[in-house]
Amino acid sequence: MKHISFDDIEQMEQRVRARLINSLSGFKSANLVATVSEDGHNNLAIISSCFHLGASPALMGMVIRPDSVPRDTLSNIEQMGCYTINHVSADIYRQAHQTSARYAAEVSEFDKVGLSAEFVDGIEAPFVAQSQLKFSLELREVLPLAINGTTLVIGEITSIFVADSALKADGYVDIEALASVAVSGLDSYHQTRRLARLSYAKPDKALVTLPVDGH
Amino acid sequence: MKHISFDDIEQMEQRVRARLINSLSGFKSANLVATVSEDGHNNLAIISSCFHLGASPALMGMVIRPDSVPRDTLSNIEQMGCYTINHVSADIYRQAHQTSARYAAEVSEFDKVGLSAEFVDGIEAPFVAQSQLKFSLELREVLPLAINGTTLVIGEITSIFVADSALKADGYVDIEALASVAVSGLDSYHQTRRLARLSYAKPDKALVTLPVDGH
């Protein structure tokens, strides 16, 4: 095993350090955050920092970095109070990655990367037509984190669209069947192969492998 | 596509809703958080809510739920000010899942599930011997989130141990080669298969597939 000390981390070249530290948390989700500005410009940004915050109410968090492209994303969310999150699947991961290029605010990443905006009655933010699992959110909180200048954005899920076949009777969504991808580090994309669904763990009881549909 | 409305979500049976909402963020990291209490009891808890917060300083966040097992984890972290995070790989994912059973505070999950605690000079919290990527953290912030009673714990990475072969010259860690697993929903574990590492995206420039070692 290689040992990397605190001093080693401190002295690392900035990009090397960014790649290393970004690898440590493990596999990350890959989502496209879609927004629209008050003056009608659509925006699309890949984000690997979405995380489950709670089921009741249904809350999702995401971290926005001060120096990253999703600045338009954050200002659109603050302007409109709503946004959508769209899973990145294996057939669109390159287009999704390309949204991280620094396009001007008035440019639609949808057009530039070749994804289609799709609108649903009553939801102002666009969805990604190609995505097989997507949902709209209403902004609940914008929490600036003083420790490093990032911003934690918390939204409540208001509407979900999911390919029928992937939604199981017990509520589980088989995102592997949708070819949703996982991210490692800053730039590596991965498909998955299920090991197992496991039963609820109890002391002194052996785990059981569950069928994918939970029954 | 199936449409699940806000009212549908509200009216869902609680466990079904938990499985559904936990599936939405996409693939999650699988980590074991290891801690020790002031009176010397080791604790080990699987957590799928670790997320990258920043590289400089090297910060990691994790969400602790009020009703979840890692309550011992949180009180140990607050007592001692330090903890370790250890990747869950395919060879230990069942033991890792078993740590989510509700063992008493004085019981060591290490012993119960068959993983080994390993200590490093100068770091009070134990590591998981079997893990091929692990790091120690010092507690920086405990942020209660009023919106749903969860707690955001922020730590700074102080020391990293990684299998030599997985650390690439450009800083990327090939966590797929370490067989680190991804989680979907509440209970599904997945291995990965790389699609590609992609070059830094720029407007009007085509993406290039990078070799895994970044060169």
Image (spheres, coloured by chain):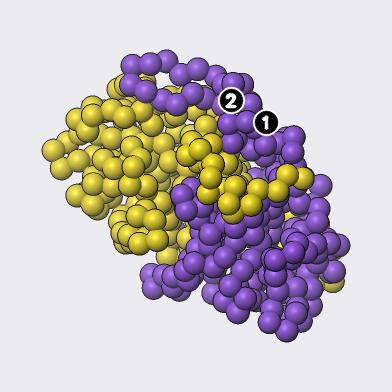
Chain colours: A yellow, B purple
Q: Are marks 2 and 1 in contact (CB under 8 Å)?
A: no
Q: Which mark is residue B214?
A: 2
Q: Residue furthest bottom?
A: B39
In the depicted structure, whether residue B143 falls above or below residue A136? below
Could you say which is closer to the camera, residue B14 or residue B95?
A: B95
Residue B163: percent from left, percent from top = 75, 42
Report whether B194 appears left or right of A123.
right
Please give the name of the residue rendered at 54% of the width and 41% of the height, measured from the top-left corner: A12
User: Furthest-left residue in view?
Assistant: A39
User: Where on the picture, by quarter, is residue A185?
Assistant: top right
Tag 1's secondary structure? strand
The relative height of residue B124 versus residue A188 in the rendered view (above or below) is below
- On the image, which quarter does residue A60 sit in? bottom left
Which residue is pictured at 50% across the width and 63% down the height? B154
Q: Is residue B188 left or right of residue A152?
A: right
**How far apart are labels 2 and 1 at the CA level?**
17 Å
Q: Which residue is mark 1?
A: B193
Q: Residues within 10 Å of mark 1 (few under 14, many from 20)?
A: some
